[in-house]
Structure formats: structure tokens, C-alpha cells
Image: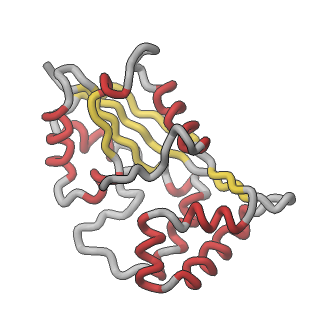
Amino acid sequence: MFRAPCDRRRDPQCAAGYHAVFDRAPVGAAARLRDAGCGVGLALRLAADPVAALQDARRVARPCGKVFVMTWGEPGSMEAAALVAALKPLLPPPPAIASGPFALSEPGKLEALVASAGLDLVVVFDVDSPRAYPDLATAQKGLGSSGVAVKAVETSGQDALDATHAAALAPFCQPDGSYRIGASFRVLMARVGD
């Protein structure tokens, strides 16, 4: 059974990101998600052939529908990239086809990919999506639920993951003991031709 990584109805951070994307996307105030057509992100990064995956998204979207692609923002200007990088030593070597979590974050990469799949670019924009946790235990629990963290536990163990997260989170500890980590996503909206 598919389980969404976050539930925008229950998770305030996810809801904020979801609304930020659709507030910025030129789909009109009355648009509904089903009218948007299709959304891809992690699945695109994991696909052996990302162009074919986008062509499939184009195929299942309504005529003149929209396809959204969301990926991490540029790692050089994003604090959360440090948390992603910290897990690398805990993971097995990536497969030869793996492009990494930031492969599509560089300006022009998403646009080129979407064009090669036969979709018409509408807009690309960045959405700030900082992570905020009230304490270390909550931060570790939240970060530990990601797919890459689960893989790190399988490979290196829970204690190694917790120690790595604690060290990587230390620079983001606020005076009140909470944690705030800057993150952003790059969002592309494309249109399916007639």
C-alpha cells in the first residue's frame, strides 16, 4: 500500500509547503489538484529513465492539463543539504544509475528534462520550506522517517543514525532547545499539449 510521505491535512509543515506551491502556481484560485493533472518528484529521481517517466505523466494527464515536478532546491544555499550529506557514510554505495538527491536542483536541469519529454514549460519557482522541531527527539524522529534514513538504519543501525543526526543538527539548535533548518524546493509546472 502506498503511504504518502506526509499528510497535508495533519502535518502543518507539509500543509504549508503544499499551500505555498499551489499559491505560487498559476492554476487559478478555483483549480483543484485533480485538475492539475499529475505530480512527480521522488519517483522521477528514482526512475531508470526520467524522460520516459515524464512522458508517462504527460500521457495520463488531461489534454491541456498540468504536470508538476518538485525537487530539492539548490544545495549550496540550503541548510537541509547538510543533513542529507551527513547520512552518506551510513548508506551503501549508490547504484550506477543513481543521480543523487540534488541532480535536478541546478538551474536549467528541470527545464531541459521537461522539454525532452515533450511538455511545455509554464513556470519554475522556489518555495521555502524550513523544518522546525521543538526538540532533538522530535527532530530525530521526523528525520528518521525518511526513506534514506530507513536505509541508513538497515545498513548501519539506529544508534549510528541517531548519533549522525544529533551531530548534523547541532548547528541548528536554537537558544530554547528547538531546531530550525532552512530548506527549499524547486517546483516546475508544465502543460500538456492539445
Q: Is residue 115 above or below residue 191?
A: below
Q: Could you tell me which quadrant the N terminus lies in?
A: bottom left
Q: How many marks?
A: 0
Give the percent coordinates (x, y) of residue 56. Answer: 15, 41
Residue 28, image quadrant? top left
Looking at the image, residue 81 sits to the left or right of residue 114; the answer is right
Q: Residue at x 42, y 79 (%)?
A: 91
Q: Is residue 141 above or below residue 88?
A: above
Q: Is residue 2 above or below residue 34?
A: below
Looking at the image, residue 10 sits to the left or right of residue 172; the answer is left
Colour mapping:
secondary structure
Q: Residue at x 21, y 20 (%)?
A: 64
- Observer-nearest of 34 and 170: 34
Q: Residue at x 67, y 76 (%)?
A: 167
Give the percent coordinates (x, y) of residue 11. Answer: 57, 45
Give the percent coordinates (x, y) of residue 166. Answer: 67, 74
Q: Could you tell me which quadrant the C terminus lies in?
A: top left
> Which residue lies most toward the right here?
175
Q: Residue at x 54, y 61 (%)?
A: 81
Give the percent coordinates (x, y) of residue 44. Answer: 28, 51
- Observer-nearest of 104 and 146: 146
Looking at the image, residue 192 sits to the left or right of residue 102; the answer is left
- Observer-nearest of 93 and 158: 158
- Observer-nearest of 66 and 145: 145
